[in-house]
Image: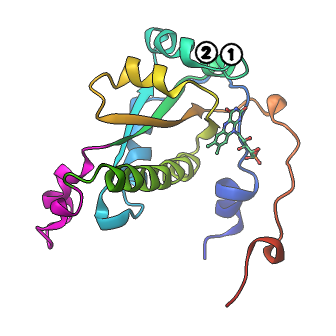
Amino acid sequence: MLDDKALDQLFRNARSQNGWLPKPVSEAELRRLYDLMRFGPTSANCSPLRVVFVTTEVGRKRLAPALSAGNLPKVMEAPVTAILGHSLRFYEDLPRLFPHNQTARSWFEGKPEHIERTAFRNGTLQGAYLMLAARAVGLDCGPMSGFDNAKVDAEFFPDGAVKSNFLCSLGHGDPSKVMARHPRLAFEEACQIA
Ligand SMILES: Cc1cc2nc3c(=O)[nH]c(=O)nc-3n(C[C@H](O)[C@H](O)[C@H](O)COP(=O)(O)O)c2cc1C
């Protein structure tokens, strides 16, 4: 089991951020984060997550028109905002990613609903792995779904093969902007043992 310091960093003291300190995040940190998150499991190792790390003023200006009013100032302040999307062509990589079963690609080809469901489920899981990996390398997260997905897709994924899911700002959070911690469901409310 991880020690208390690690558990606090990943879960108990980790908060969703609403403001950011003016401390940069390097590409090396983003690569370190990715190199951890990519080991999180996905079905048939399909790995549909695609990420755009928006780190420049030019990138932030491209993202701005899609953001809700509440999220706009947070994204403008954050050193990095990751656009988390899922590829609808993920199955083309299965011969390489799932090499022991060379028929895996055929499970998806020509089946758009199955492709979409699988990409969304596993891309969302990988988004959660990304947040935990960010915390593991010492970064804070600010996840956001308050934005216009169609606008983000048109601007960042114009060929239609990747669909945005959610955004996550990354950096060093401003502790003065964090809300009071909201309650969580107790084990008895959320779980059964059958
Ligand atoms: C997928 C997702 C979407 C979210 N969307 C928004 C958002 O658009 N704007 C916002 O201010 N917070 C957003 N949040 C933040 C949540 O409200 C926050 O994670 C939750 O209240 C728990 O807060 P805590 O991590 O500080 O305990 C989002 C969180 C997640 C995981």
Q: Is residue 116 magenta?
A: no
Query: Closer to the camera, 168 or 157?
Result: 157
Residue at image position (42%, 56%) is: 122
When asked about the image quadrant of residue 70, the answer is top right
**Residue 113 percent coordinates (x, y):** 36, 52
- On the rendered structure, is 97 left or right of 115? left
Give yes or no for contact between labels 2 and 1 (Cβ–Cβ under 8 Å).
Answer: yes
Which residue in the rendered view is the most extreme toward the bottom? 194
Query: Closer to the camera, 182 or 157?
Result: 157
Residue type at tag 2: Met
- On the rendered structure, is 135 left or right of 110? right
Residue at image position (85%, 37%) is: 179
Q: Which residue carries the number 1 mark?
A: 73
Q: Is residue 92 magenta?
A: yes
Assign ligand 1 to one image quadrant.
top right
**Residue 15 percent coordinates (x, y):** 73, 45
**Residue 117 percent coordinates (x, y):** 41, 54
When asked about the image quadrant of residue 98, the answer is bottom left
Q: Quadrant of the N terminus?
A: bottom right
**Residue 2 percent coordinates (x, y):** 61, 71
Q: How many marks?
A: 2
Residue type at tag 1: Pro
- On the rendered structure, is 126 left or right of 77? left
Q: Which residues are magenta?
A: 88-108
Residue at image position (56%, 13%) is: 64
Within 10 Å of disc 1 (Cα), the crowding (few <14, some 14-19, many 20+) is some
Q: Which residue carries the number 2 mark?
A: 76
Q: Quadrant of the C terminus?
A: bottom right
Within 10 Å of disc 2 (Cα), the crowding (few <14, some 14-19, many 20+) is many
Is 184 above or below relative to 103?
above
Question: Is the shortest distance between ligand 1 and the CB of mark 1 under 8 Å?
Answer: no
